[in-house]
Image (tube, rainbow, N blue to C red):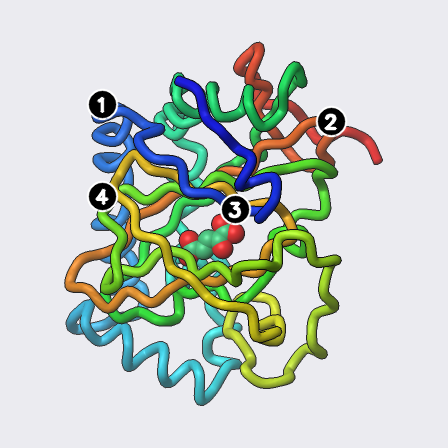
Amino acid sequence: MKFELDFFRQQGYQVCRGVLNASEIQILHTLLAQAQAQACQELQSALELPELSDLGAFMSACEREPARFEALPIELRKLLVGHFSLETRLDPLLWTIPRSAGIQALLAEIFPGQRVGMHMPPTARFVLPGHRWSGVPVHQDISYNRHMQDFVTIWMPLVPINARCGGVIIHEGTGALPEQSLPEEGSPPYPLFWQSELPDLGYPQIQPEFEPGDVLLLNPWILHASAPNLSDYTRLSVDCRFFTGSSQKHSLDLQHWQVLEPSPC
Ligand SMILES: O=C(O)CCC(=O)C(=O)O
């Protein structure tokens, strides 16, 4: 498999089609669909919700009274914003991604001749229909990932992504912007969990469509945000960060398939 990445180098993002094969997609989808069912049960029972559909009302109440959200255990807060548990993110089945021939071909094109690591653990997300609280506000990946110098995000959905089941909104033309300063904490809109939203600089916004197996490459500077899920099915996706050089957090060595301790500063 060979990829032409000139567009990525110029624009800071690119959609690559058919990177993961059907059996890789099946492994990842099964893992995350089971984990999502379990996460929903956990949320319903921990929050004592009669129905899962009461989750929206619970989150709206937290928006009116953020202290209520902040008082919850961190693992519960993460589930509420669509982050799978650490146990799921550490599942070796997620190594299907860096072991995939398609992903390896992409990495060889992005980092030619270089030794590549994957930040551990990868992020895996579920976005329940209409659950807007799982949406990451407009950001640059650099501001969430200061522990790696040279990295690329590979985002991949495990369900079809279209105008209703949204994936990622890209602010086209921002791939070479310098790092933007975050607005003062507390300035509106104040997210429940994420860093404050970067201001909209007026660039055109696009929302690519995907089939499972397609992936999105993002450089650390491009402005992007989650798109809402207006469909009637849950969005399942994984985002992995691959880097060269050292990392000050745990990573997966893609040559020896070992998890490495953080490098000293
Ligand atoms: O999956 C999402 O909704 C957001 C992903 C994202 O912003 C990222 O991977 O940097």
- Residue 105 or 69: which is nearer the viewer? 105
Q: Amino acid at mark 1?
A: Ser
Give above or below for 112 relative to 228. Answer: above
What residue sits right under mark 4 in the picture?
33
**Residue 111 pos. (x, y %):** 62, 24
Amino acid at pointer 3? Tyr
Disc 2 residue type (three-letter): Gly
| Residue 20 at x, y percent in the picture | 32, 28
Kindly report the distance in space between the C-alpha atoms of the residues bearing marks 4 and 1: 15 Å
Whether residue 7 sits left or right of residue 243 in the image: it is left
Residue ID for mark 3: 13
Q: Give the mark nearest the N terminus, 3 or 2.
A: 3
Q: CA distance from mark 1 to mark 3?
A: 26 Å
Labels 1, 3: front one: 3
Q: Nearer the viewer, mark 4 or mark 2?
A: 2
Q: Which residue is mark 1?
A: 23
